[in-house]
Amino acid sequence: MIKESFIYNGEVIHKRFKPKTHFFKYKVFSLYLDFDEINEINKKIHFFSYNKFNLMSFYDKDHGPRDGSSLVDWVKKNLKSIGIIDKELKIKILCYPRILGYVFNPLSIFFIFNKNSDLISILYEVKNTFGEQHTYVFKVEEGRNFIKNNCNKKFFVSPFMDLNSTYNFKVLNPGNNLSVIIDQRDKSGKLLFASQDGVRSSFNTKNLLFSFIKHPLMTLKIISAIHYEALRLWFKGIKLVKKKINIKNNITFEK
């Protein structure tokens, strides 16, 4: 029985504050996958496959080292770099699924729990439309249900924002509700507010199909929306920022 993996239906909001205001939101659904259950999900859930094409699917090569190798091993290797060595870890990922073979995840989050089910680490995996990726790795104080993490921006995401800013992540330990907030600031104040919320449902064939019908071709809609909103920003006269550094896949270990 699938007990630790869920589906979250909700919406994403982006609000830009300067140099000109800009706002949009859209409906999405996310998968919250427990890697201990992913093979069971692959066997039991119709319309879903693990590392194989289906209506919806999850591929290891879409995350972590991006080479199709074990994501669990990759996470554990990175946790060792921040002093977390535990054989009884439970690792989960919040992400969008591939739909008909296509996916773009602007942000995927790995949640790592100890044997007592305490959240002990979070990995924020950020992607841009150039095929690049950066992962911010944080420890989490045990017992926290609402997590705050701060770091300097180290990765080019939007062609309308440079790297001179900070991220303030605020994440609710996923339960009945999902809440992920990114508050981006520079020296003169708030730049961007981005959030994703959602309501949890059981991971079964009925709910997965319902989410697909409610959000058809969602992953194509996400990448289309990114380019459409970029065009709107350009029409508003916001200047493009030249991309200076190429980072195919990088990791930083934050405090």
Image (cartoon, grey):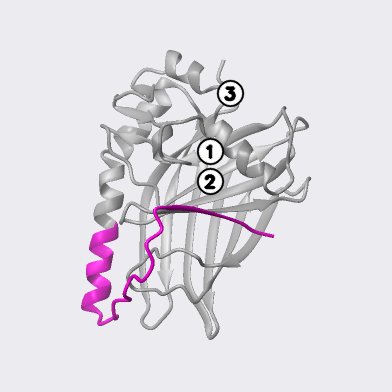
Question: What is the span of residues highlighted in magenta in the rendered image?
Answer: 226-255
Mark earlier in primary sequence (2, 3): 3
The local crowd at label 2, few if under 14, some if 14 to 19, many if 20 or more residues have their Cα within 10 Å, is many
> Residue 36 — which label?
3
| 240 within the magenta span | yes
Among the 4 quarters of the image, the one containing residue 43: top left
The total of numbered circles placed on residues is: 3
Is 75 placed above or below 140 here? above
Kind of residue sitting beneath label 2: Ile
Nearer to me, 106 or 72: 72
Nearer to me, 12 or 50: 50
Distance, label 1 to label 3, CA atoms, is 11 Å
Mark earlier in primary sequence (1, 2): 1
Distance, label 1 to label 2, CA atoms, is 6 Å
- Tell me if label 1 and label 2 are in contact, CB under 8 Å: yes
> Residue 32 — which label?
none
Kind of residue sitting beneath label 3: Asp
Say which residue label 2 marks: 109
Secondary structure beneath dot 3 equals loop
Q: Residue at x 64, y 60 (%)?
A: 149
Provide residue 233's location: percent of width, then percent of height: 28, 73
> Residue 93 — which label?
1
The local crowd at label 1, few if under 14, some if 14 to 19, many if 20 or more residues have their Cα within 10 Å, is many
Q: Residue at x 56, y 51 (%)?
A: 179
Secondary structure beneath dot 1 equals strand
